[in-house]
Amino acid sequence: MERYDLLYRLYDEFDTKALRELQDFVDLFPPVDSRVALDHWQDASDELESRKDEIRAEFAYGGTFADIAARADREAAFTAQDLYAKYGRDVNALVLDVDETLRSAGGTDNEIPRDTLHAMTEFHEAGVPIVVCTGQTLENVKGFAIQGLGSELVHSGSLSIVYEAGTGVFTPGHGADTKQLLYEDLDEDVRGVFDAIRARVLPDAPEDLRRSVHLQGNEFNVTLKPNFDVGSPRAAEVIDAGLVYLMDLLAEAVEGVVGDAVAEDDPSTTALVRAYYADADPEVREVLESEGAVPDATVEQVPAELDSLLDRIDVAYYHADAAEVGSLELNKVVGVEAALDVLGVDDPFVLVMGDSKSDLRVMRWAAEGNRGIAAAPEHASEDVLDHVVSTDELVYDRGEAADVLRTAYVLNSLSKLS
């Protein structure tokens, strides 16, 4: 009997909803000292095993099918089977963004839901490495990881943290490879540009801007954050001004590298840098227009030497949240590859979960090399959703990352059937 037929039988003949409710209760039951509560948990555990035994007795791979029914609803199970039929592989690593992907301030008080944490722990116990891939600083994400996942998992040797969107990789338990500072591999010119910006960004800022922003504690990227609630009108105002200021600082820094490339009759380096990034990102152009800083130049006027340098430097804008200058040679893809190398994943087929443009790069890397599948929350950026819908349609509701993790868990279970 084919797997699809077996799944139809499983979900038609057994009360899988009751089974999942029992499994969730047993897995997520909070630790308590009450004897009555513990007795209730034991009764639920006994009933769960009894119901699983009924399934085990009816299928050749009864243990696997009982496990599937206890963790995934019909839709998730058939989605997993579709994925296996398409790719013929199981997921051998998780690549997970944190903010607005695993946790969502809009629906889960900015904490990772317990069912999501439990699903991640199950993958860990099954020997699947986890790569936490984030734009946050290392200290921030280390704190989250230890608090949410536990020190034992974090220091197990099978978890890696790609931080600051790829400037570094932290993989506890791997000796000299525990911390990799990927920005040290950049050439001297690019590092010099960032050193110059970092040294001046706050001291040289106009007083109103200096009082309204702070630097995020990055090791390499230069990121301005608002001293106001993220998303508020005042935050939007200062980040828009900060973006223009950062681009102008960048222009002065690159002029020290390629100054001779800009002829006297060319537009100013400031105008050329603004034109370059306005052409590259419509959001940046909108900010320049709103700030009265539209460049008196076109991207076609950017000299080749300056264009080549700017091709390596990213100017990122996050509305009412952050303005950043980073390296395009340091991104989440570079970080993920380095993390997987340390973790010993030689032939990756990963589940990538994310919501932003930096996550999209990893999703495309996975798709183009047949290296995995991608999933995103419903509130992800438009480009991310377009990619996810056009591949495997793994879009989930806000705060429900566990749904996709369960689907991947079932995919791995199905792949073990002969």
Image: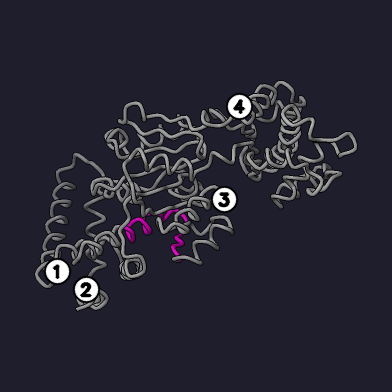
Q: Is residue 403 magenta?
A: yes
Side of 397 where 145 appears, left or right: left
Q: CA distance from mark 3 to mark 2?
A: 39 Å
Numbered disc 1: secondary structure: helix
Q: Who's the residue at 26% across and 67% down the image?
A: 17
Counting from the top left corner in percent of width and height, residue 390 is at 51, 67
Marks 2 and 1 sit apart, C-alpha to C-alpha, by 8 Å
The residue that mark 1 highlights is 55
Question: Which amino acid, by three-letter code, is at mark 2?
Answer: Leu
Compute the Cα span from label 4 to label 2: 61 Å
Q: Secondary structure under badge 2?
A: helix
Asked if the residue at tag 1 contacts the one at tag 2, i.e. Cβ–Cβ closer than 8 Å, the answer is: yes
Disc marking residue 188: 4
The three-letter code of the residue at mark 1 reads Ile
What residue would you read off at disc 3? 357
Q: Which residue is mark 2?
A: 10
Find out whether residue 179 is within the magenta segment: no
Q: Earlier in the sequence, mark 3 or mark 2?
A: 2
